[in-house]
Image: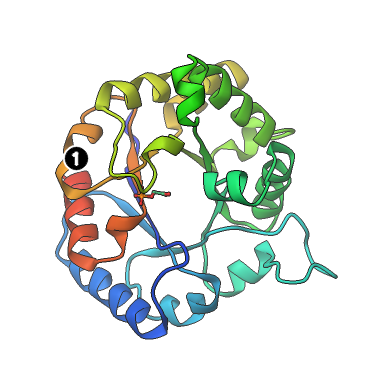
Amino acid sequence: MTRQPLVGGNWKMNLNAASGQSLAAGVAQGLESIHGHCDVVLFPPFPYLLTIAEQCGSAQLGGQDVSQHQQGAHTSEVSGDMLVDCGCTTALVGHSERRQNLGETNEMASNKVHAALDAGLRVLLCVGETLEARQAGHTREVVLEQLAGSLQGINSQVWDRIDLAYEPVWAIGTGQTAGPEQAQEVHAILRTEVESRYDARSAGRTRILYGGSVKPSNTAELMACGDVDGVLVGGASLEAESFLDIVRAVART
Ligand code: PGA
């Protein structure tokens, strides 16, 4: 089963209006000359979504988060409908920086998955273990618990609109990438779990991205793993050329 690879650029809370626009314009221009099949989604900070929507060319746009709620008295939150209004196709859900620093639980992530899907968005759901969990041999247990907890009540009909990202917490922003074998091992665990939750067809179609210190120099070896279908990039997505080099490496696979 061939899966269209996906590259996400998670800008996190970086850049400003001017540098964000020029990054998006640089990425858009570079994408014009990249031949090969690869979906690209940029995740800028919320305030810049509307302007970046005009600059991002063939790249899609995503929200770094989405509210669990549809509307109402939820100060500072951004709903799925608002993301759609701003031109987003996708919402990132359950990023470890939200789980760890802002107390986001699996239940909240699950509500967000539902809210995003209800608004017509795709979801990129992140899971990943801490260094302590890995060292204690609990990686499998942790990612499966996050997966099950974040997908409560999600049936096979909507599964087609969900992509997964395995992002080991110890590899995010640390320069320490999971080796291809480590990534492949967890990706295979996730795919097998999708098969047992849904069916072989759904598992075969699910894109599972790797994230955590992805750079141009380690993208090809990660993409060579059978169950790695793309990458979610933080730091290296903040500069057009390094991000485009990653997209090129992915599009060549
Ligand atoms: P990083 O971040 O590439 O800077 O490690 C990845 C992410 O958090 O999505």
Mark 1 surroundings: few (<14), some (14-19) or many (≥20) residues within 10 A? some
Q: Nearer the viewer, residue 25 or 11?
A: 11
Left-right relation of 169 to 147: left
Residue 10: image location, x then y, percent: 41, 58
Q: Is residue 84 above or below residue 55?
A: above
* Residue designated by label 1: 218
User: From the image, which quarter does the C terminus lie in?
Assistant: top left
Q: Is residue 241 visible?
A: yes
Measuring 17% from the left and 64% from the top, which residue is drawn there?
Answer: 241
Residue 88: image location, x then y, percent: 52, 66
Residue 45: image location, x then y, percent: 50, 70
Q: Is residue 191 above or below residue 67?
A: above
Amino acid at the residue labelled 1:
Asn
Q: Nearer the viewer, residue 170 or 139?
A: 170
Q: Quadrant of residue 94?
A: top right
Q: Quadrant of residue 159?
A: top right
Left-right relation of 124 to 25: right
Measuring 22% from the left and 64% from the top, which residue is drawn there?
Answer: 31
Q: Is residue 217 above or below residue 179?
A: below
Measuring 15% from the left and 44% from the top, which residue is drawn there?
Answer: 217
User: From the image, which quarter does the N terminus lie in?
Assistant: top left
Q: Nearer the viewer, residue 163 or 241?
A: 241
The structure's colour scheme is rainbow
**Disc 1, SS:** helix
Left-right relation of 195 to 212: right
Residue 244: image location, x then y, percent: 20, 59
Q: Quadrant of residue 3?
A: top left
Q: Residue furthest bottom?
A: 18
